[in-house]
Amino acid sequence: MSKSIVRARWLLEGFDGDTPMIYEQSALLVVDGAVAKIGDADDLVAEHPDAEPVGSGQDLVIPGLINAHHHVGLTPFQLGSADHPLELWFASRLGLRAVAPYLDTLYSAFEMIASGVTTVQHLHSRAPGGLNGLYKTSKEILSAYDEIGMRVSFSMALRDQNRLVYLDDDTFLNRLPERLRPHLAAYFEAYKVPFTDQLALYDDLTSMTDGKLKQSAQLAPSNLHWLSDDALQATADLARKSGAHLHAHILETPYQKQYAAKRTGGSALTAFDEMGLLSPKMTIGHGVWMSEADIELCADRGCHVCHNCSSNMRLKSGKAPVNALLARGVPVAIGIDEAGINDDRDMLSEMRLVMRAHREPGLASAAPSASSVLKMATTHGASTTPFSTSIGHLGIGAQADLVILDWKTITWPHQDPAQGPIEVLLHRVKTNAVKQVMIAGDVVYADGLFTHVDKDAVLSEIAERLAEPLTEDEAAMKALAHDMLPHVRAFYDEHYTHDPAQF
Ligand SMILES: [Zn+2]
């Protein structure tokens, strides 16, 4: 039996409704990776003299943060793509350098854990090599999380159409100059996996994660435009049969809203609902262009929304209706998506951005409070994953996923005590205050070092591999990305409106 006592100056257990349950000079007894007791620190130490002490008792202890929407390790910007509006970005990022999935996963896990993230919703987009390629990539990614000790809910995106623009692959190929067609066709071919195989991968993922305390699998119906009606229906059937949690990108951009109207005559959310895909197990990634009726439908079906604030800003997607969603009682989680505002995976900075990006003008206007943003990154993030109520709080029985934040670093040389610890946390904390990160009772990060993986060695290996000249494939894909951009733009110029008044 493993036993430790985590001492805190301030201990946030979680939220009772919207009220933070925060205790002064308290401690947690952690037994075999779960919270066994909360109480006075000295009493717990006297009762359990054999427990390993963790934390100085001078710090703020909070539940581990949940990055509820994540895709890759090194960022698209690092690997060669500038920020573009999403629809052009799909083309621009065809030319990204390739990084081995294991190293790539560790790269962003370092950044996430160092900013207090203990659970990630990893939505992997694609892998070459057919079903075997998907299987192999998934295995490598899961082994990286296993190695570093991070909790993950993993999925591989389901898609069967419209892989570059919101148009059938063959029809788009036919719009291209003849010399470009074979290159794009070869790319489509390399990533083609029959939809039944994509669904079958879910069984493989559940077997891979079965019996692993820190791993779970989900379904990710990628987005309306990427899925035919048959594929949506088959996904809904599998979700019903398996009871899986789902995460879908929906209404991320104004073009996706227009696409849904063209295809269905209505909203993407209604289309998902008609397929039976909306339930408390569904998380809507982005949801920037949800109408009032969409928000109502989302609330009625008990769906979650994952707000990806940095991503929406960087890719010119728009501003999500976060205040309206929260006011309607929709649980909103936070995701850093492909990269945050500083081109990294810093959840502390992402929470601050969310708190400040939705302050509407005026004395009587809405704005998320510090504690509601922290609840988004803990309680709500947790319930978008199959780990659900076993994480996102530190109540008795919960997994001991927690972050110890150095109160002195946050407040030095002075902080007026009128601001409570959660206000201070959300306004001032930076990654230099993250002292220790514990996941399922295991301290995976302490004083700037990862306990299970040599970060410097991993970064050196990534640097070495990427210092090599482009492979033939990479050079060809870079050229393809460059050649595709004007044709992708021309497609949207021709078939979609760019006029915000008509969004
Ligand atoms: Zn995404």
Image (cartoon, rainbow, N blue to C red):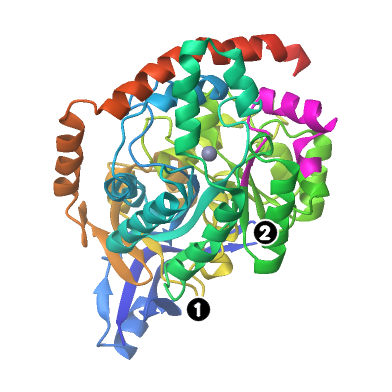
Where does the image place residue 292, in percent across and percent down from the top left?
81, 35
Nearest the viewer among 136 and 288 is: 136
Q: Image height check: is 373 above or below 472?
A: below
Instruction: Examine the image and state in which quarter residue 357 appears.
Output: top right
Looking at marks 2 and 1 on the same chain, the residue that comes earlier in the sequence is marked by 2
Q: Amino acid at mark 2?
A: Lys
Q: Is residue 404 magenta?
A: no
Q: Is residue 261 visible?
A: yes
The number of discs equals 2
Residue positioned 57% across, 48% down in the render: 194
Q: Amino acid at mark 1?
A: Gly
Q: Is residue 314 visible?
A: no
State the residue position of label 1: 397
Tell me the SS state at disc 1.
loop
Indicate left or right for 158 with 23 as reference: right
Q: In the image, which residues are magenta?
A: 248-271
State the residue position of label 2: 281
Instruction: Examine the image and state in which quarter residue 63 appears.
Output: bottom left
Work out how far the residue at label 2 is from the one at label 1, CA to CA, in angstroms.
Answer: 22 Å
Which quadrant does the C terminus fall into?
top right
